[in-house]
Amino acid sequence: MKDVIIIGAGVIGTNIARELSYYDISIMVIDKNTDVCEETSKANSGIVHSGYDAQPGSLKAKYNVIGNQMMKSICEDLDVPFIQNGSLIIGFTKKDEEELEVLKAQGVLNGVKGLKILNKDEVLKKEPKLNPEVYSGLYAPTGGVVDPFQLTIASAEVAEMNSAIFQMETIVQSVEKIGDFFVVHTDKGDFTSKILVNAAGCYSDHINNFLSENKQEIRPRKGEYCLFDKQIGTLVTSTIFQLPTSMGKGVLVTPTAEGNLLVGPSSFYVDDKEDKETTLSGIKYVLETAKLSVPSIPLNFIITGFAGLRASEIGKDFIIGEQSDVPNFYNASGIESPGLTAAPAIAKDLADMIQEKNQFLKRKNAVRKRKNIIRFEPATLHQKKRLIAHDKEYGKIVCRCEMVTLSEIKQAIHRPVGAKTVDGIKRRTRAGSGRCQGGFCAPKVLEILSEELKLTPFEIAKSSKKSTFLLGLDKELKGGSFE
């Protein structure tokens, strides 16, 4: 019996777990994946939105603006990369400028600070690589970029350091309430709790609908992206948007918190909640649309493409709070953009709702801050010498593109909620994130994981048990297949 079970280990679920872990209660986070941050949280823009385009009075507007204001201090506490680089929404005609004025007025209503309409000269002075046909732009200085992987992982680490349990590789099959308690039926057995929090992303409607007569419907929207080499990471300094449409904020061009350039996303509804494949048409649309903003984007610097799903609820807004007909069941569902920005605010508000009703005791000596793995690549020569002197494995480079060392990879494995997959190492250390996308280092990372986790190399996966790298030994090959 747990005090709280949270379903979903994305940026919402882990942040809620972190906030609740400051109280002296038992917490379990259940997720179907091998690692945290495996769904929407790993495949988004990493943008900290200012809040100008959310409908005034909506929960999206409320949590966007509060989350934006919280992000700097949260990232400092959790040692997560965050840059407040500002965002720029550009228009190409006088009519576009009128729409920018509407967005500005809407942003002011939402409480966004510092919004300013820039004329053509001001826009091009700020961002010289933009299309010279630009007419004007709306500048939002509070916009930023954050590392979404690290924000999710760091929150999970703090929660686990405060005794939260992460029950991974566990598929929720159904949920029911029996008396005053919730029973979560999974493929790994039943788990019970007094309080249940639904942060299940694209499947949050399923969890809600098991319990409540107030039905939800999530229809996922796919977004496809292209990631570019760090060599062109400074092509623009602000996050560049075109005018938003009914399908979202449109295709952006932005530096990332880690120094790459990111372009995307497309936006279209899909029926399959597991459809994360990139498509020729989607990538073509993203690149062609991005070139309207920045014509000089060098396509030969693309290093990878990826796709993610956004949990778009038919009501078009977040659903946050206790479900009216199911006491002690709390929703954090319908979380699409600006969900990443809103995550710290949603987590704090939901934890406060639960605490106000239950009056838990504060956890003594609760961990509220964490330090990230010390990165070798950005260190000065003097700092690198000191790191190697203290730990000789900092002198062994595993990933050449990102200069990731053996020490960093081992630390990533043995930290709270440690990495168990090659992708888990990638998100925590950036090994495999560079130009060759793991072409050089993946076999070595697999070997290190095998040794440190005491597993055979055949058990080590890219991201899940469905994505193991090895089938068998060459000498076992018979008749063109492994038997």
Image: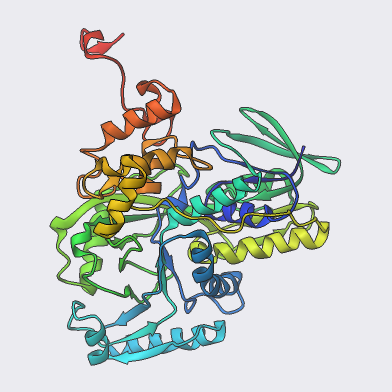
Q: How is the image coloured?
A: rainbow
Indicate left or right for 303 with 329 as reference: left
Indicate left or right for 70 with 248 as reference: right
In the foreground, 112 or 283 = 112
In the foreground, 215 or 377 = 377
**Residue at point 56% right, 74% down?**
61
Residue 183 is situated, as x and y percent measured from the top left of the image, at 74, 37
Asked if one can make out residue 32 in the rendered structure from this viewpoint, the answer is yes
Indicate left or right for 55 with 473 as reference: right
Query: Does 444 sit above or below residue 83?
Result: above
Give the total number of marks visible in the rendering: 0
**Residue at point 20% right, 55% down?**
302
Residue 379 is situated, as x and y percent measured from the top left of the image, at 30, 58
Residue 378 is situated, as x and y percent measured from the top left of the image, at 29, 58
**Residue at point 61% right, 28% down?**
187
Residue 335 is situated, as x and y percent measured from the top left of the image, at 55, 59
Query: Does 288 sit above or below residue 86?
Result: above
Indicate left or right for 466 with 193 as reference: left
The image quadrant where one finds the C terminus is top left
Asked if one can make out residue 430 in the rendered structure from this viewpoint, the answer is no
The image quadrant where one finds the N terminus is top right
